[in-house]
Image (cartoon, rainbow, N blue to C red):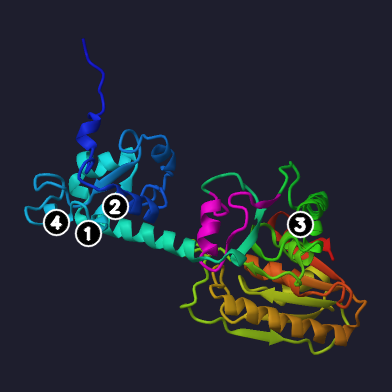
């Protein structure tokens, strides 16, 4: 009869069960915040401590340099010296304790384990140092919100916020979901449906709380078509303090990259202002004038705020987003002076997500021109009219 394969007995993995003092164990559990310190794991183990199962099933106090010279990474001189040193101990789940001490000892030298321990404890220190007034309500807007691998996952969002802010209610985020539907974005009904959905969800989940000042700071993470991002920015406004985050492609992160080159902006103004006013916003791609003329006619008066070298991963720095916002505000005032406050402004965006949101935030509904937002649609061979603000 073939016997079923069994795990090694618990005693084979009881690293330091009797050699680590209660005080040292408590210090380690505190520094690890009760979570597995193996890189990428972070499994909570507090339940095992409370239930008395520590070192039985999941929560293990493990030696980096073994407590005996013949153990994993053991040393005749250093093992007895480090046996009760918290700097030589890691808190690990059952899987990773077995991995480093039994299954893959050679893949886990002392230096690698010390790096894991240091990174984990540094992260706990950063989180613990954040003051209570750094709480920020997270607004998450985009497709496939529920998928863990999405760039809009809670883990990616929280990592981008720290250490300046932290999610006010943990994983309980404010989700403005895009309803699944069979309509295509080249159909006019598509834009009306998503506009209505966004406005109603915003009113139900955010609007009243902003008016009551129940929300004092927002962190905005979004992935959606540009006209809807502009609408989201208009709904958010610029009264409540907030950080609008930008997803970086290389490397993929929501963190700003302050060590990257600044964006060089340029402006273009029309020679005549008798035609329909059009505003080209080109940071992610170049928008040629013929595409604008095709959408609204040959007599369009084209204004432009553009990056000198546009590409789809251009916005890396928070101060570049601030510069875009400032220059856009000035340009909107110039266009209004030239064309009149009541004249609709036709807006053609090719922008990073955060910049599209700022287009909506920077506008003043009672003072600025009405806006018509366009979106590039390959099924209809060019820009199409989508949302009016």
How far separated are the C-alphas under marks 2 and 4?
14 Å
Give x and y (percent) for residue 6. Answer: 26, 24
Residues at marks 3 and 2 touching, judged by CB atoms closer than 8 Å: no
Q: Which mark, by number, is residue 111?
A: 1
Q: Quadrant of the C terminus?
A: bottom right
- State the count of labels: 4
Residues at marks 1 and 4 touching, judged by CB atoms closer than 8 Å: no
Name the residue carrying label 2. Answer: 24
The front one of 241 and 19 is: 19
Observer-side mark, 1 or 4, equals 4
Q: Earlier in the sequence, mark 1 or mark 3?
A: 1
The answer to whether residue 227 of the structure is visible from this angle is: yes
Give x and y (percent) for residue 63. Answer: 22, 49
Give x and y (percent) for residue 22. Answer: 29, 47
Residue ID at (56%, 44%): 147
Residue that protrudes farthest toward the right in the picture: 342
Q: Secondary structure at mark 3?
A: helix
Name the residue carrying label 3. Answer: 206
Q: Which mark, by number, is residue 81?
A: 4
């Amino acid at each position: 009869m073939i016997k079923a394969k069994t795990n090694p007995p618990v005693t084979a993995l009881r690293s330091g069960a009797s050699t680590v003092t209660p005080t040292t164990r408590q210090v380690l559990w505190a520094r690890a915040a009760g979570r597995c310190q193996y890189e990428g794991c972070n499994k909570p183990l507090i339940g095992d401590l409370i239930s008395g199962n520590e070192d039985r099933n999941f929560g293990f106090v493990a030696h980096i340099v073994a407590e005996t010279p013949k153990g994993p990474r053991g040393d005749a001189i250093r093992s007895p010296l480090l046996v009760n040193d918290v700097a030589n101990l890691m808190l690990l789940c059952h899987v990773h304790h077995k991995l480093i001490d039994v299954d893959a000892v050679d893949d886990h030298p002392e230096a690698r384990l010390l790096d894991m321990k240091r990174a984990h404890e540094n992260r706990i220190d950063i989180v613990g140092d954040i003051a209570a007034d750094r709480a920020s309500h997270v607004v998450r807007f985009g497709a496939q919100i529920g998928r863990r691998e999405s760039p809009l996952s809670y883990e990616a969002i929280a990592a981008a916020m720290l250490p300046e802010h932290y999610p006010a209610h943990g994983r309980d985020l404010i989700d403005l979901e895009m309803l699944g539907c069979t309509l295509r974005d080249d159909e006019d009904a598509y834009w009306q449906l998503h506009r209505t959905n966004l406005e109603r969800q915003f009113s139900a989940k955010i609007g009243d709380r902003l008016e009551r000042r129940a929300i004092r700071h927002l962190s905005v993470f979004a992935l959606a078509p540009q006209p809807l991002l502009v609408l989201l920015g208009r709904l958010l406004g610029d009264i409540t303090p907030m950080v609008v985050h930008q997803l970086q492609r290389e490397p993929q992160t929501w963190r700003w990259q302050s060590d990257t080159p600044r964006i060089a902006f340029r402006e273009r103004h029309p020679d005549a202002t008798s035609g329909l006013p059009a505003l080209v916003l080109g940071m992610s791609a170049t928008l040629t004038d013929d595409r604008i003329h095709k959408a609204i006619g040959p007599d369009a008066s084209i204004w432009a705020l553009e990056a000198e070298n546009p590409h789809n991963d251009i916005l890396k720095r928070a101060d570049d987003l601030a510069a875009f916002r400032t220059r856009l505000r000035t340009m909107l005032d110039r266009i209004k002076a030239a064309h009149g406050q009541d004249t609709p402004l036709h807006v053609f965006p090719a922008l990073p997500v955060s910049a599209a949101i700022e287009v909506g935030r920077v506008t003043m509904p009672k003072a600025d021109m009405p806006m018509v937002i366009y979106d590039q649609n390959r099924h209809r061979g060019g820009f199409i009219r989508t949302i009016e603000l």
